[in-house]
Image (cartoon, rainbow, N blue to C red):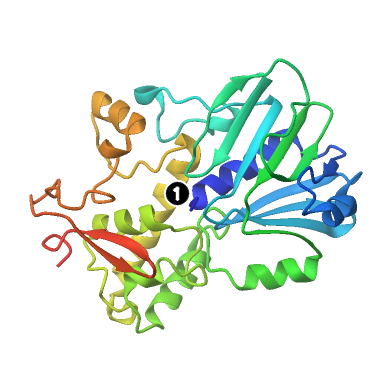
């Protein structure tokens, strides 16, 4: 399932190339025909990501809410800015990758499905829909096709507020002490394992399986430790680390969770998932710190990876 950074990057694409334009909405697949008719001819006024949910606002306070789930993806095409990954040249404080290329060009770009992005030159515009496109959003120069989402609906502002009220804080939205305080209070009020709480979107927004494993290892936290038993200062450090990793992932386009890498190792990590993480998908391999074999077990319906020594 796409994690929070992917949705923020998708929102950036909409803000850069769709907000302010009149949108021609359609449902090539046919399953979203009524919703497409409601949006057709409206101007997109805002694109906002909160955790794993995307809210596209149109005039007259109509919103398209999308949750990609496990199999959803957006295809952008036309005059869009394809991200570039240049290994060691991508710094943590670099410009957001969706706007780093400069002038847009005619291209096709897929986003989500775990950041499966590919920029392909287009011969013409708009391109024919590929696959079962639930909704197509078209301007004079850009098009966005949505396939396979878990949720795709047109809602009003009251329903938006109800959806947002269900979500825990997101560091890209709830900046500063307010979001940090909410996170700490949410965790410390629960007698539930921290490894389960981090996957609960009502506790904290945007964390998925990769970031869960990596954040817990970086904090040297046992994933089974109940939230209410974790010291407040340790939870505040965990929140700040999540904010740091999320910001980096939004900019770089990869869940790069290892710090202090040399130029060569950083380039290798950006190119290969096997060289990018501390524990994620490294079951049976030696811990990069202590050499103990990484364990795998199921928690909250997903595979959990952790070091039984460093996170004891």
For residue 274, what is the image quadrant? Answer: top left
Residue 53's place in the image compared with 5, above or below, is below
Q: Is residue 104 visible?
A: no
Where the C terminus falls, by quadrant? bottom left
* Residue in front for this viewpoint, 143 or 85: 143
Q: Is residue 312 left or right of residue 1?
A: left
Q: Is residue 114 left or right of residue 15?
A: left
Q: Is residue 116 left or right of residue 245?
A: right
Q: Residue furthest left?
A: 291
Q: Is residue 139 left or right of residue 311?
A: right
Q: Is residue 31 visible?
A: yes
* Residue in front for this viewpoint, 28 or 149: 28
Callout 1: few (<14), some (14-19), or many (20+) C-alpha neighbours within 10 Å?
Answer: many
Q: Which residue is mark 1?
A: 246
Residue 24 percent location from the top left of the image: 86, 40
Residue 123 percent location from the top left of the image: 71, 15
Q: Residue at horizontal 59%, vertical 49%? A: 72
Residue 104's place in the image compared with 91, above or below, is above
Residue 243 percent location from the top left of the image: 43, 53
* Residue in front for this viewpoint, 141 or 15: 141
Residue 221's place in the image compared with 97, above or below, is below
For residue 308, what is the image quadrant? Answer: bottom left
Q: Residue at horizontal 79%, vertical 42%? A: 28
Q: Residue furthest top?
A: 123
**Does dot 1 land on a helix, a strand or a loop?**
helix
Tag count: 1
Residue 62 percent location from the top left of the image: 84, 58
């Amino acid at each position: 399932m796409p994690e929070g950074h992917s949705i923020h990057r998708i929102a950036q694409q909409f803000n850069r190339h769709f907000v302010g334009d009149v949108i021609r909405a359609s449902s090539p697949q046919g399953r979203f025909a009524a919703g497409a008719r409601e949006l057709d001819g409206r101007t997109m006024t805002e694109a906002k990501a909160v955790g794993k949910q995307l809210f596209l606002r149109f005039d007259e306070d109509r919103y398209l809410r999308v949750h990609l789930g496990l199999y959803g993806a957006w295809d952008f095409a036309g005059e869009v800015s394809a991200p570039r990954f240049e290994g060691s040249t991508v710094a943590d404080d670099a410009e957001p990758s969706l706007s780093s290329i400069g002038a847009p060009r005619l291209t096709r770009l897929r986003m989500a499905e775990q950041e499966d992005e590919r920029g392909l030159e287009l011969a013409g515009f708009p391109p024919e829909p590929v696959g079962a496109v639930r909704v197509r959003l078209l301007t004079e120069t850009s098009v966005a096709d949505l396939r396979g989402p878990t949720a795709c609906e047109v809602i009003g502002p009251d329903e938006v507020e109800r959806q947002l009220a269900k979500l825990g804080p997101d560091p890209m939205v709830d900046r500063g002490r307010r979001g940090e305080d909410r996170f700490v209070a949410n965790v410390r009020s629960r007698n539930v394992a921290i490894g389960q709480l981090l996957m609960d979107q009502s506790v904290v927004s945007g964390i998925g399986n990769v970031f869960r494993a990596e954040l817990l290892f970086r904090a040297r936290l046992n994933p089974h430790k109940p939230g209410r038993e974790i010291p407040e200062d340790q939870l505040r450090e965990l929140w700040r680390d999540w904010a740091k990793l999320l910001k980096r992932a939004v900019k770089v386009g990869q869940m790069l969770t290892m710090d202090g890498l040399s130029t060569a190792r950083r380039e290798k990590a950006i190119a290969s998932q096997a060289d990018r993480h501390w524990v994620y998908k490294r079951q049976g391999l030696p811990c990069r710190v202590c050499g103990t074999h990484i364990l795998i077990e199921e928690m909250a319906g997903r595979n959990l990876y952790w070091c039984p020594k460093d996170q004891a």
